[in-house]
Amino acid sequence: MASRQQLPEREVTEQAAEEVGEEAMGPAAIASAASVGLSLYYFFIRGERQLGTFIGLWPPTILAFASYFNQRKMLNKLQSITQPGTSLRNAIDSMMGNR
C-alpha cells in the first residue's frame, strides 16, 4: 500500500475531503434521521399532526447547520494554507497531519 507521500495529489485531496465530510455529517445525519422517525411517530401514531409537522421541519435545519460548520472548517483550512510566508508543501503537510 502506498504512503500518503507517494499518492498523487488528487487522491490525497479527495480522501481529505471525504474524511472532513464524514466527520462533520455523521452526528447530523443521525439526528436528522431520528427527527424524521420522531415526526412520523407523532404524525401517524399519536395523531398530533401539528407537532409531527413541526418536528418534520428539523432535519433540513440540522443538515444546514452541519453544512455551515463544515464549510467554515474548510474555509479556515484554506486560509491557513494561503497565509503569506507559507509554502504550499508545508501547508499541505500540516493540513494532512504529517507535521
Image (cartoon, grey):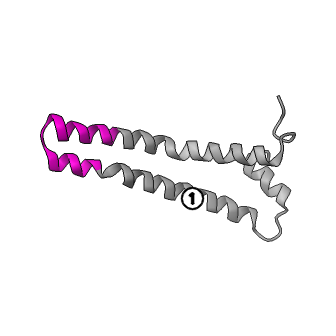
Q: Nearer the viewer, residue 70 or 39?
A: 39
Residue 31 magenta-highlighted: no
Q: Which residues are magenta?
A: 34-56
With 77 as the anchor, is 35 left or right in this view? left
Q: Residue beneath label 1, please? A: 71
Position in image of residue 77 (x %, y %): 67, 58
Residue 44 position by quadrant: top left
**Residue type marked 1:** Gln
Secondary structure state at the residue bearing disc 1:
helix
Which quadrant is the N terminus positioned in?
top right
Position in image of residue 30 (x %, y %): 42, 39
Position in image of residue 28 (x %, y %): 44, 45
Magenta stretch prevailing secondary structure: helix
Label 1 crowd (10 A; few <14 / some 14-19 / many >=20)? some
In the displayed orientation, state which residue is furthest to the top. Answer: 1
With 49 as the anchor, is 32 left or right in this view? right
At 59% from the left and 57% from the top, the residue drawn is 73
In the displayed orientation, state which residue is furthest to the left. Answer: 47
User: Number of numbered discs present?
Assistant: 1
At 24% from the left and 39% from the top, the residue drawn is 40
In the displayed structure, 34 sits above or below 73; it is above
In the displayed structure, 5 sits above or below 68; it is above
In the displayed orientation, state which residue is furthest to the right. Answer: 6
At 69% from the left and 62% from the top, the residue drawn is 78
At 69% from the left and 46% from the top, the residue drawn is 16
In the displayed structure, 83 sits above or below 17; it is below
Residue 40 magenta-highlighted: yes
Position in image of residue 9 (x %, y %): 81, 48
